[in-house]
Amino acid sequence: EVDVWRRWYGKPCMPAWEELPFKPDSMDAETFPHPERIEWMLTAFMSQEEMIAKAVDMETGCALVGSNGTEATHNGANATETCLCSWCSTQDPPTPWLREDTQRVEIAMATYNAEYGLITMTSVNLFFSRGSEIQKRVEMMSSWMDPFSFPLSELIPMLFFDIVWVSMLLYVAVTEVKEIVHVIRVGEGPHWYHSLWNDYIAFWNMVDWVTILVAFVVVFMFVQLMGQNTLMHSAFKVVLEAEAQIYGDLESQMTRTEYLVIVEDFYTALDKTIAAERSMRLMLCVYPMMVMLRLFKSFAAQARLAVVTDTLQCAAQDLIHFFMVFF
């Protein structure tokens, strides 16, 4: 027992890539930046008994795989003669998939709701802390299969107001550019940048430009999302065609290796689509805040309303200290 304790106590420390002193939130569970050991449960090629046997092999590191034509058992589940854990079978000696240095396990699956046209990635996340506590987090992230599949009665008003918003955005950008050109032309400074610094660079003008930049970033992210959505839609179509070959009575049957490549491509495209959707929605949360700042700019044009902005300007230092303590 002393030797066992010394071997355990003498193990090297395994630093975590990210500490979790508190319970993980959605931002921690929505992304998986560095997966190391990925295993697939393909329902099209594996029965329920085979998936259970694979889970057993992942737990034991294929230690219960039968030899000489015999089968070992574990908790009533039969273990096959070959190791079903792809990663475990490549280790020498065989090593369990869930190891002592494991920091996080994610079980993910994709579901499609044809009624609403939504595809959802559901992930069950298990975070292993240094204090041996397992934190659990279930996240569901969805995206439209086709954002323009709504009825025309809903699609036309949406497109109309989108065009109006983009037109107003371009108008504001062109107006600001014209103002810059005017300041440079009539400026009295020795150089054009002196004229900009003295006559144009101000807090509210910077608010205008930040608002314009954030709006253009939103437009860019939407275009990026549409591109990723198109790729994901094509990958999903390939998966459906492959499953039609597997479950159908076609002469050319899909092999497991070919099907695995198709599934991996689909999940990669789905991850990128969901990441683009999440980034665009986060930026959409920033944009209204910038619009509110532009609203305060209009207050400065009226003496009574300017009391609000003047008060905020005078109390800026105290407000910054308050938010530092509060957040």
Image (cartoon, helix red, strand yellow):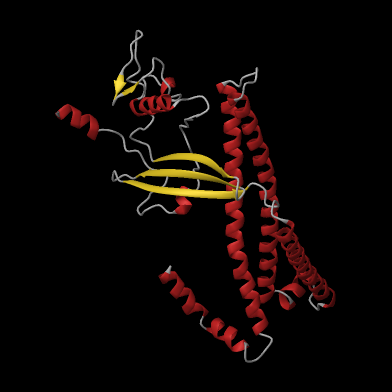
Q: Does 137 sit left or right of 33 as displayed?
A: left
Give residue 257's position: percent from left, percent from top.
57, 22
Name the residue nearer the viewer: 229 or 3.
229
Q: Is residue 7 above or below residue 183?
A: above
Name the residue nearer the viewer: 169 or 13.
169
The extreme bottom residue here reads 304
User: Which part of the image, by quadrant, shows the C terminus?
Assistant: bottom left
The extreme left residue here reads 1
Residue 202 visible in the shown view: no
The extreme right residue here reads 185
Q: Residue at x 61, y 68 (%)?
A: 288
Which of the 4 image quadrants contains residue 77?
top left
Give residue 313's position: percent from left, percent from top.
56, 82
Residue 118 visible in the shown view: yes
Give residue 84's position: percent from left, percent from top.
43, 22
Which of the 4 image quadrants contains residue 204?
bottom right
Q: Is residue 123 above or below residue 96?
A: below
Q: Is residue 233 above or below residue 322?
A: above
Q: Residue at x 37, y 41 (%)?
A: 15
